Image (spheres, rainbow, N blue to C red):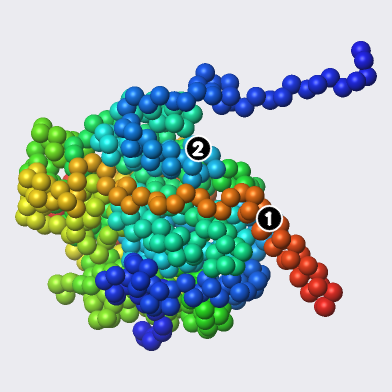
């Protein structure tokens, strides 16, 4: 495995300090993809995306082309872009939103044309104050440039785009909660099936929800063809993808990498990527795809960065965020903090998630702070089992959305990999790492 | 009974049954400029209520927090009840239904920051500010928050002030930052209260509904023609 020399499909522009401006965007081929798309039929544009076999970059990894094909049968009213990036340690969309908002807008317009929607909403996380500012400014410029609004580039295709701020709620990254939030309500996920947003979405109308990174890939795919995109990567995981690397690494950041061809080892240790673990320490464990994913240990470091490869090994590539923990990390403390996050962000609709996350957090806290009991490990696993029966991967679901079944991932992993650490906490009445 | 169909009573929309129906709301708390901007925002959405969160951000920029009076005004603008505004606002971390300091300092302690000393930074912040996370200093300048992931994990431990990123912080740089916030040295890039509304939308919706309907109908007809031609060719 190696780091392949491939074109930077979505991060090519962000090295420039003025990458967010219309001037820079136009000087680097901006809006050419949209101009080309408008000369094609909507079916042909959708076909290119289908050929590219672009997997949705939000976390679930559903092919964007297939999602669209489900909709082409009935007309779609709304396109909603999910920029509510809040999965812990995921910060790739943050980069795209702040540094290349025009690329996002161009991708959005291409999708709007392919789907023939009448209105687009770009939902951005409220905490992205600068991102909101830059995207709104870019949108203003795009309207003046004729790339958004009435009769785009004289093609007879019109669509309006609205940038909408969120207000701080992890659950609003779930697409139906996002739609509720966009309707001005509490971010409660909707029950599905039977009706997915494709059938009943925003204001009860057919709606497509796509992630920011997915949209940002579209200008390149239209310009270079879906086949060129599909030629990168391997199997179902085509193209390049953004990986957000954080935690105990010398060089944390967002890297655009060809899928499957590169391994977690390359990502963490290659000098041009993560640059290894600081202070010469050893790897203890890593999170392969956001904190909802079960952890991997040093044994899995040579796995390739591919959707199916990671799924087969019992976890998920999810949101593309990799968190590295060195051998000085307390696994109890790390999984406690992740559990605390879920307890705080559970929307409270479903009992297993609302109650379960709270209880799990309290038990984890008492183990970490030295008040753990011997029966706590079984109690933890039992509570986890109530949220996601059988603790399988992919998890069984007892709740409306997948936040609930994500809670046991870190606890299950920590107990499975580092059971002795839990026992030391309980026996010695405190954290051995303090 | 006659055979002629009785005229069915037409359903009256909920909004028309409200006592406020048909009245132009009088706004006692929002300033004129904010109210104008609020009305421009509402015009962007098919349903007024969708503008609720953007309006809350606007109002917070004026008042610092969502006062009961402000929520009454927002409700009047959207033709919903103040309770509905409160119900939505209390769900979201960024919407404050109680007073906060002029600078909300959010220290992330989630996984990537935890691994890079965030808990130690938060403990330092609590002792140097003399408040627990969630509290506001006596002078009303600083509210300290323990935040969930703020999506800036390559600058860990990550700190935001009024949702502007200030980069990775150490105990020393944190104290310097607080001193700057108090002295007003950072007031240009991090003013008091909300900083989410700096760039205003310069245009309303441009594509009117009738135009869009005509365009889409023409395209749908062309698409089915192409599909039929393709089928005939197969």
Q: Nearer the viewer, residue A62 or B210?
A: B210
Residue at which label 2 appears: B48
Where does residue A408 sit, x and y in percent of width and height?
A: 41, 51
Secondary structure state at the residue bearing disc 2? helix
Residue A288 lies, with reference to residue B105, above or below; the image says below
Disc 2 crowd, CA 10 A, few/some/many (<14, 14-19, 20+): some
Residue B146 is drawn in which quadrant? top left
Q: Check residue B62 in the rendering and tell me which mark sits there, or answer none.
A: none
Q: Chain of mark 1?
A: B
Q: Is residue B17 above or below residue A401?
A: above
Inter-mark Cα distance, 2 to 1: 25 Å
Tag in front: 2 or 1 = 1
Query: Quick check: B185 left or right of A304?
Result: left
Q: Secondary structure at mark 1?
A: helix
Label ID, residue B214 = 1
Q: Position of residue A71 (x, y in %)?
A: 65, 59
Q: Quadrant of the C terminus of chain B?
A: bottom right
């Amino acid at each position: 495995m190696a780091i392949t020399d491939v074109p930077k499909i979505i991060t090519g522009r962000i090295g420039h300090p003025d990458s967010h401006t219309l001037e820079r965007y136009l000087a680097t081929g901006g809006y050419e993809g949209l101009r080309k798309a408008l000369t094609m039929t909507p079916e042909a544009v959708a076909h290119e995306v289908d050929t590219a076999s672009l997997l949705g970059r939000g976390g679930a990894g559903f092919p964007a082309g297939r999602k669209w094909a489900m909709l082409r049968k009935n007309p779609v009213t709304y396109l909603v872009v999910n920029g509510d990036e809040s999965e812990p340690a995921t910060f790739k969309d943050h980069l795209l939103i702040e540094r290349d908002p025009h690329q996002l807008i161009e991708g959005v317009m291409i999708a709007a044309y392919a789907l023939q929607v009448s209105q687009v909403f770009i939902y951005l996380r409220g905490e992205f104050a600068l991102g909101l500012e830059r995207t709104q400014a870019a949108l203003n410029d795009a309207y003046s440039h004729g790339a958004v609004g009435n009769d785009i580039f004289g093609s007879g295709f019109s669509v309006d785009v609205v940038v909408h701020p969120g207000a701080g709620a992890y659950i609003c990254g779930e697409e139906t909660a996002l739609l509720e939030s966009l309707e001005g309500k509490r971010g409660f996920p909707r029950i599905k099936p039977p009706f997915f947003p494709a059938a009943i979405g925003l204001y009860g109308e057919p709606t497509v929800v796509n992630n920011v990174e997915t949209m940002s890939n579209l200008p390149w795919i239209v310009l270079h063809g879906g086949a060129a995109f599909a030629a990168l990567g391997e199997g179902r995981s085509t193209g390049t993808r953004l990986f957000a690397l954080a935690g105990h690494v010398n060089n944390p950041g967002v890297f655009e990498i060809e899928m499957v061809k590169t391994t977690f080892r390359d990502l963490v240790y290659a000098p041009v990527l993560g640059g290894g673990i600081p202070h010469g320490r050893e790897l203890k464990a890593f999170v392969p795809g956001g904190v909802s994913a079960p952890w991997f240990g040093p044994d899995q470091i040579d796995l390739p960065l591919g959707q199916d490869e990671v799924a087969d090994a019992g976890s998920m590539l999810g949101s593309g965020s990799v968190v590295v923990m060195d051998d000085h990390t307390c696994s109890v403390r790390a999984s406690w903090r992740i559990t605390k996050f879920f307890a705080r962000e559970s929307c409270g609709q479903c009992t297993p998630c609302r109650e379960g996350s709270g209880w799990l957090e309290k038990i984890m806290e008492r183990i970490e702070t030295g008040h753990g009991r011997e029966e706590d490990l079984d109690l933890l696993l039992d509570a986890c089992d109530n949220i996601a029966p059988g603790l399988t991967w992919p998890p069984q679901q007892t709740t409306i959305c997948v936040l609930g079944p994500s809670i046991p991932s870190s606890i299950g992993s920590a107990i499975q990999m580092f059971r002795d650490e839990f026992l030391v906490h309980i026996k010695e009445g405190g954290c051995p790492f303090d | 009974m006659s055979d002629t169909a009785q005229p069915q009573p037409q359903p009256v929309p909920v909004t028309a049954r409200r006592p406020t129906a048909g009245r132009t709301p009088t706004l006692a708390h929002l300033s004129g400029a904010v109210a104008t901007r609020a009305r421009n925002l509402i015009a962007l959405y098919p349903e007024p209520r969708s503008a609720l969160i953007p309006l809350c951000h606007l109002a917070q920029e004026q008042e610092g927090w969502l006062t009961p009076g402000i929520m009454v005004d927002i409700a009047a603008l959207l033709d919903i009840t103040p309770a509905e505004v409160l119900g939505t606002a209390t769900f979201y971390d960024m919407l404050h239904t109680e007073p906060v300091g002029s600078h909300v300092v959010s220290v992330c302690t989630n996984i990537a920051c935890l691994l890079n000393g965030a808990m130690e930074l938060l403990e330092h912040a609590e002792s140097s500010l003399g408040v627990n996370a969630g509290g506001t200093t006596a002078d009303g300048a600083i509210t300290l928050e323990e935040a969930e992931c703020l999506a800036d994990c390559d600058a860990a431990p990550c700190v935001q002030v009024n949702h502007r990123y200030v980069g990775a912080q150490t105990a020393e740089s944190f104290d310097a930052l607080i001193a700057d916030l108090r002295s007003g040295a950072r007031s240009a890039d991090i003013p008091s209260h909300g900083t989410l509304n700096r760039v205003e939308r310069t245009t309303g919706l441009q594509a009117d509904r009738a135009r869009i309907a005509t365009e889409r109908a023409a395209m749908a007809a062309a698409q089915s023609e192409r599909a039929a031609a393709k089928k005939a060719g197969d």
